[in-house]
Amino acid sequence: MQMDCDGVAENIDAWALGALDVEEAAALDTHVAGCAACRLLADAASERAASIAMAVPLVSASHQLKARVMAAASVMSDLPARRAANASRWWFAGAAAAVAFGIGALTWGGYLQTQVSDLRDREARVRTDATAQSNQFATMRTELVQASAKNVSLGSDQDAVLDIVSRPDLQRLPMSGTNAAPAASGRYIWSRTGGLGALVTSNLPALPEGKTYCMWIVYENAWTRGGAFDVDQTGAGRLIVRDLASGQDHGAFRGFAVTIEPSTATTQHTGATVLESGLQ
Amino acid sequence: MDYTGFRDDELMDRLAGKDLGAFGALYDRYSDLVYSVALRVVADTHVAEDVTQDVFLRVWRRPEQFDLKRGKFVTWLLSVTRNRSIDVRRSTGRRLRREALPPVAGEEEDVIPSTDERDDPALATVLADERRAVRKALEVLPQEQKLAIQLAYFGGLTQQEIANQLGQPLGTVKTRIRLGMQKMRVALEERRGRDRNS
Ligand SMILES: [Zn+2]
C-alpha cells in the first residue's frame, strides 16, 4: 500500500488518533518519513490528538506512587546498560559501586529526607533514620548492580526489592561462608513488618547435579524455608523471600542460613550450611 | 535545587545527566495528568498507576526519545501515555463497551487536583488554561463526532472497528473523525490567535 501527500492529508487525524488499520498506518509512516511537508502535518496532528488527552477529568495520583517511581528511577540509574556487560565488567561494577556509595547515596538520602516526612503520615515516625536507610539502600543498589553485571536476571524481582527498601524497618545483615564454603559471602536485606527479604550471594561453589541452594530463616525451635536459588559460574545468586512472618511460634529468631539441598522441594534442612548470618 | 522556573525541555536536558531532582520536578508537573489519561483508558486505578510508572520510567531511561523540534514535551508525554495505556488495555483484554466509557470532558465537573503541595502554580495555570480551551473546543463538536474521536483515542479502536460498533458505514466514521478534528483545530487556532493579540 502506498500513500501520497493527499492521502496523508486526508488520513492524518485518524492516524494521530491511532484509528488507522495497520497497513494504512504503515503506508502513512513511510510517506511521512520521506516528506518534510507531511511531517509538519503529522506533528501538528499529534499535538491536536494529545490535546484531547488534556481534556480528561483530572484525578490525583497517590503519594505512594511517587515514592515508587522515584525509587525505581534511582535503582535504574545504576543498572548497567546492556553493552557494558561484557567489556570491562569488573571495572564497571566498581565504578557503579562508587557512584552508588557516593553521589547516589547523597541523592537518595536527600530524596528520602523529603520523602520520609512526606510519606509517613505527615508527622509521627520521623525518627526513621534517613541516613542509615540511604546507606543501606546504596549498598543494596551496589549489590544489584554487581548481580546484574554478572548477568543475573533482575526481572520482576525489582518490584519486591523496591518494596523492601521503602520499609522503615529495613535491616541489612552480612552473611559469611562457613568452613564448607569459606570464599562465599552474601547480604540479606529484609523488612520484618513487610514480610519481605532479598538475598544476594557471591562466590558460592558450583552446585552438584540435582542440588539447589536453599535459604532458611532460623528460629530457636525450627528452620523455616525462605526459598531455593541457583548460582551462575561466579557463584552469584539472588533470591526474593516473601512472607517471613509466618505467625507461628518457632521460638526466638536466630538468623539466616543457606544450605545445599536436593532440587526436589524440601521443607526440612538436611545439607551442610554454606552461608550464615552469624546465628545467635 | 529549585526547579520551579525551569521549562520542560530544560528539565529533559537535565535527565540526560541523570538528574533525579529534575525528574522529580517533571513528575510533580505531569503525574496527575498522565495518571488521569491512563485511568480514562484502562478504567482501573491499579493498572493506571502501573502505566504511570511505566511512562515516567521510560522518560527517565530514554529522555533522548523526546525531540523538541517535533513538538511540546506534554504532547509527547501524553502520546506515550495514551499508546502505553491502549497496549495495556489490549493485553488485559479489556474492551470497554461504549456505555462503559467513563465520562468525558464537558460531561462532568472537573475534579480539581490538590495543588497545595505542587510547587509550580504558574505552570499549573498555563496547563489549566490549555485544558479549558480544549474542553471548550470539544464542547462545540456534534455528539457523534465527539464519540467517534473518543472511541478512537481512548478506546483504541480503528475506524473500521468504530464503524462496526456503531453500525455505521466506514465512510461515515471517517468523515466524522475528519470533520471533528478540523473543528478542534479551528477552535484551538482561534484561541491561540486571541492569545497572541491580547
Ligand atoms: Zn507528503
Image (cartoon, coloured by chain):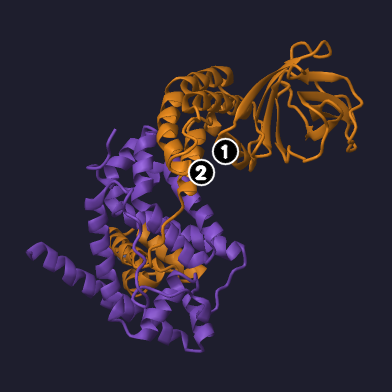
Name the residue located 39 percent from the left edge and 42 percent from the top edge.
Answer: B63
Query: Dot 1 lies on which element?
Result: helix
Q: Which chain is orange?
A: A
- On the image, the x and y values in percent for residue B132 come to 26, 68
Image quadrant assignment for residue B186: bottom left
Q: Chain of mark 2?
A: A
Q: Position of residue A168 (x, y in %)?
A: 55, 34
Disc 2 and disc 1 in contact, CB within 8 angstroms:
yes
- Identify the residue at horizontal 47%, vertical 88% (top origin): B169
Q: Which mark is residue A68?
A: 2
Quarter of the C terminus of chain A within the rendering: top right
Circle 1 crowding by C-alpha within 10 Å: few under 14, some 14–19, many from 20: some
Name the residue at 49% across, 71% down.
B155
Residue A266 against residue B71 in the figure, above or below: above
Q: Is residue A223 left or right of residue B98?
A: right
Picture coordinates of residue A128, whole percent (x, y): 50, 30
Location of residue A154 (image quadrant): top right
Give the spatial CA distance, label 2 vs label 1.
Answer: 7 Å
Q: Colour of chain B?
A: purple
Q: Amino acid at mark 1?
A: Leu
B5 relative position to A120: left or right: left
Question: Is any part of residue B66 visible from this angle?
Answer: no
Extreme-front residue of the structure: A124
From the image, tell me which residue sits under label 1: A162
Amino acid type of disc 2? Arg
In the current view of this chain or complex, which residue is farthest to the left?
B197
